[in-house]
Image (cartoon, coloured by chain):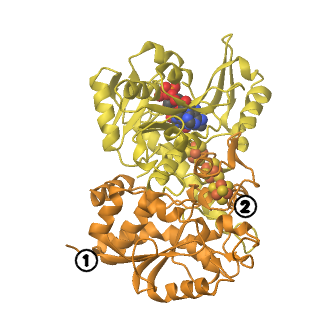
Amino acid sequence: MVLGNYKTCVAARSTDKEILKGAQDGGIVTQLFAYALEEGIIDGAIVAGPSDEPWKPEPIVATTKAELLAARGTKYNLSPNMSLLKEATRSYGLDRIGIVGTPCQMQAVRKAQLYPIGMRDVPDKVALAIGIFCMENFPYQSIEALVEDHCNVKMESVTKMDIGKGKFWAYTERGAVAQIPLKVTHKYEQPGCHVCLDYVSNLADVSTGSVGTPDGWSTVFVRTKIGDDVWSKASAAGCFETKEIESGKTGLELVTKLATDKITKNQKTLEGRATFGVGKGLRNPYL
Amino acid sequence: MVEKITVGHVHMSGCTGCLVSFVDNYEGLFKILDNYADIVYALTLADVRHVPEMDVALVEGSVCLQDKASVEEIKETREKAKVVVALGGCAAYGNITRFCRGGQWNQPQMESFVPIGDLIDVDVYIPGCAPTPQQIRNVCIMAYLLLKGTDEQKELATAYLKPLMDLAARGSDAKRSSDACGCDLMYDVINQGLCMGCGSCAAACPVRAISMEYGKPQIERDLCIKCGACYAQCPRSFFNFDVINEFEGITELITGVME
Ligand SMILES: Cc1cc2nc3c(=O)[nH]c(=O)nc-3n(C[C@H](O)[C@H](O)[C@H](O)COP(=O)(O)OP(=O)(O)OC[C@H]3O[C@@H](n4cnc5c(N)ncnc54)[C@H](O)[C@@H]3O)c2cc1C
Ligand code: SF4
Ligand code: SF4
Ligand code: SF4
């Protein structure tokens, strides 16, 4: 159950060179949205676009491929994509919304659909929710500290950030690669991540991440009927190169291990919170 | 034809926006009325002058303490209804009526407006201003399944309604008085180390009092009308995996029921 319900799991990457160039991994998110946009399955997608500060994402409603391309790549800090979900149906006038997000944002999407307390006319308009894997996220200022103080590079000179193989990586324009061990990054994490019980976006239509596949490829879980429909059509249209996911130590087994580790650790945090202080406790959102 | 439930709309001090929102289900409203619910009381819709026995009372608006008829009517509603639902921010939390200080023609002495939970126990809250047609629809369907469904459906309805009942229990707690504010995001989410920066709260706010600054809600407290939508929408206020994990099935169920 740590990987959620899914119909299929494959290794995949986009067949579009332009998408792959600036994508984080296999360009799954950008490719799937671009296809859905072209086919009218969605009218636009909420993605983490660029802002006027380097590496600080700004949620945007992308309605063209160019806007999707401009939002490629992982920003390791908060992009409150849900903040545009209602607005997308209002000033942007979308009837079929795409949205990408971390597992917690996929949870937010489903809560908004089942409990649309402040989400008038939104539930039926979510047409494609793509989730990304996520171990943790950071406040913007944390990423600034990690990149500028620990990695010793300027935010604006960084061309890609990545987390993998036990390290945080910052690649720069001039080809330099800075890396720090992940244990340095832990204290900078967003506190809310420590009660998070989902690693692979269990509630998305399609979810994807880098873990479990070789560099430049992505692990993809196709989860819902909606997801299955879009994924099959996009694959049939030649959007993706796919291969079987490895079951062994660098494949699905690794995904399962990381998911289990995350959930176990955070369950412990929740238990600790229940008796935090002396005869007191902190709130548990899941009870 | 399956047996229907009986529903009433009880109008306290509210603007009728909640009722309009219910009606904004359009064909869905007719579907509900044809198959699942009979409206047995509603000033604007049914010619009944006195609160009758009913399964579900949807109460809109806060109670004016200086209006004896309202005070009596809310008490009677508690006696006559199996399930009392606070429909919308005013009934649940006082909402905009919290700011009333009287002086308004033609009853200038009427100045004290309280959420219904200050006078009676409430079973279910539907926060928001206005509450959304889809949330009202979902509560109606679940109330129907709870009262008339199969055992399995009753179980689902109970699980679905639980967080809305928990909000009501909290609101009807005399020690606390019902209160809602953008500050809930500070006290009960961020101060508790639970916020993960999704932005649901900002999307939910009807008066745009919330903006996201570096991934966290920034609340313009002077704009807040105290409707309770932001906190209730936040995935870190309540998140019931047993229900939300089943989103695909439940969405199909709701669509099926409304067809
Ligand atoms: C905070 C964070 C932590 C992650 N942790 C892991 C991990 O532990 N293991 C793993 O396998 N994968 C992780 N990922 C996912 C991975 O980094 C890639 O985002 C994912 O594989 C998609 O790559 P892609 O090439 O398919 O997407 P692309 O085509 O490059 O598109 C990525 C999409 O994600 C959006 N996006 C970027 N940053 C954010 C953000 N902060 N919030 C919401 N949306 C965003 C972009 O706008 C874009 O639309 C994480 C991602 C994030 C944002
Ligand atoms: S770890 Fe969980 S809470 Fe934190 S950003 Fe990732 S999905 Fe959200
Ligand atoms: S901040 Fe907005 S959503 Fe929250 S209680 Fe106030 S008015 Fe309602
Ligand atoms: S809705 Fe999201 S951003 Fe707002 S308080 Fe809750 S977790 Fe934080």
Choose between A108 and A165: the one closer to the eye: A108
Q: Position of residue A123 (x, y in %)?
A: 43, 49
Give the answer, above or below, for where A238 lies relative to A56. above
Q: Mark 2 and ligand 4: say if the CB distance to the nearest ligand atom is below 8 Å.
A: no
Q: Quadrant of residue A175?
A: top right
**Mark 1: secondary structure:** loop
The number of numbered badges drawn on the structure is 2
Q: Hey, which residue is sitting farthest left in the picture? A: B1
For image coordinates 33% across by 72% down, the residue present is B37
The chain letter under disc 2 is B
Disc 2 versus disc 1: nearer the observer: 1
Q: Position of residue A58 (x, y in %)?
A: 63, 32
Left or right: B27 in relation to A119: left
Left or right: B24 in relation to A226: right
Question: Ligand 3 lies in which image quarter?
Answer: bottom right
Q: Colour of chain B?
A: orange
For image coordinates 40% across by 47% down, the residue present is A124
The amino acid marked with disc number 2 is Tyr
Q: Is residue A39 visible?
A: yes
Where does label 2 land, which residue? B187
The chain letter under disc 1 is B
Q: Which image quarter is the C terminus of chain B in?
A: bottom left
Number of the label disc, if any, that sits on residue A58 = none
Chain that appears yellow:
A
Choose between B123 and A241: the one closer to the eye: B123
Choose between A63 and A195: the one closer to the eye: A63
Q: Quadrant of residue A82?
A: top right
Q: Position of residue A212 (x, y in %)?
A: 44, 33
**Mark 2: secondary structure:** helix
The amino acid marked with disc number 1 is Glu
